[in-house]
Image: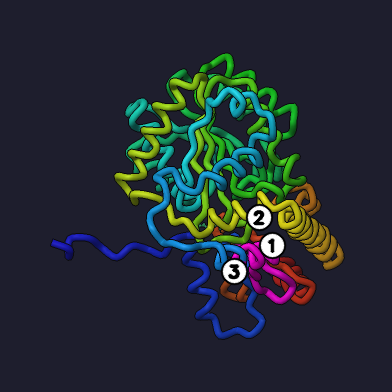
Amino acid sequence: MLEVLPKLPADPILGLSAAYREDPNPNKIDLGVGVYKDEDGNTPILSSIAKAQNILLAQEKSKTYITPQGVQGYIDGMLQLLLGKGHPALIEDRVAAVQAPGGCGALRVLAELLKRCNPDTTVWVSDPTWANHIPLIGNAGLKIETYPYFDKATASIKFDEMADCLKQVKKGDVVLLHGCCHNPTGGDLSKQQWQAVLEIAQQQGFLPFVDVAYQGFGDGLEEDAYGVRLLTENLPEVIIAASCSKNFGLYRERVGLAVAVTNSNTVRQSMQSQIQSIARGIYSMPPSYGGALVDIVLTDPELKLEWQNEVEAMRLRMQSLRQLLAAKLAEKGANKDFSFITQQKGMFSYLCISPEQVQAIRNKHSVYFVDSSRVNIAGISLKNVDALATALVDIL
Ligand code: LMR
């Protein structure tokens, strides 16, 4: 029976890591998978997390099951981080949430929830969007359509086209939005554009589904929550998938949150039971460890401050790498204006070059990034930026 299925090609993002590892070139550069790296190319455990691990080790007395929704302190802390203290939906107890195994787990649980609510719903995703959004949502059996988002020719958001498309999306459909640090383009909505999206959602009645995987990497922890807070303060229903992979550096621990902001406590109770039953039917309950660490960090004022400073340091470093790459490319006489890199937000930039050029730079110079031309800005360093800019200029 098993022989009927073929071998599949490597994952477009994760597959790059294997190809990079196998490349014998000592000067190879990895700008593929979205993980933060320091100047030496390492992804260290955050100091606040390392301290929380020690606290947890001393505190934890049992490995019995946790509650089906996950670590409650983690859920409460994350909801405050996302929605802000004193959010009306929190005060009125209208928010259902479960700890999920990573942002991916949260996206999948919420996709399954949408399927239960309306099996005929269409989820509208940005063109382009994160490659894994498609299987996470599509494998739940939902239809997917795209709305225009990013113009490679001008390296900017095509908001008028996006707005025109969203004005056709009907009630009962869902629009997936990136809360901040758009993956893969780094092109974020301005405050005015978020306001316009809100007004279109109010008019059309579609359900916004916000993916928040990079909070703190764009303009700051509070600033990056602008869009998700605007929508949840002004719409009766919004669903949110959040991840702690990047801003807590907890990638392998798989720490995420699936949230349904509803319009009443009664609906909240139904949603809470539905999300938990979906999780029970897939993986039963989330792993406790990563959520317990985040809970410790967010509830201890000193650790929280240390973590906030660590997120800020990662954000500022990525911003300075953006400046550095754009300046190097200009200095080396690139026949294309790359100043847009400095305007984009978060971990990724779209270099707006062709897949053939991406493959050429990989084959000739051992520089690894996604075929779409998405680069992981955190993979740049003072040591490799010169070689990177030389390689890019050569290929262009
Ligand atoms: C990325 O976009 O590179 C990361 O979110 C890792 C992944 O799972 O794709």
Tag 3: amino acid: Tyr
The image quadrant of residue 360 is bottom right
Residue 268 part of the magenta segment: no
Residue 341 horizontal side relative to residue 290, left or right = right
Residue 78 at least partly seen: yes
Q: Are marks 2 and 1 in contact (CB under 8 Å)?
A: yes
Q: Is residue 293 left or right of residue 281?
A: right
Locate residue 285, reporting x and y percent.
Answer: 38, 50
Residue 154 vs 50, above or below: the answer is: above
For mark 2, what is the residue? Answer: 297
Residue drawn at 74 percent across, 51 percent down: 301
- Mark 3 — residue? 368
* Residue type, label 2: Val
Q: Which residues are magenta?
A: 35-54
Task: Give the position of the C terminus as an image quadrant.
Answer: bottom right
Give residue 48's mark. 1
Ligand 1 occupies quarter: bottom right
The rendered magenta stretch, by its main secondary structure, is classed as loop
**Residue 22, x across and y down, in percent:** 50, 80
Q: Nearer the viewer, residue 188 or 369?
A: 188
Asked whether the viewer can see residue 318, the reply is no
Q: Residues within 10 Å of mark 3 (few under 14, many from 20)?
A: many
Earlier residue among tags 1 and 3: 1
x, y percent for residue 351: 68, 55
User: Mark 3 near ligand 1 (CB under 8 Å)?
Assistant: no
Instruction: Kindly identify the residue that appears in the image at 44 percent across and 43 percent down.
Output: 69
Horizontal arrangement in the rendering, residue 64 relative to residue 225 (left or right): left
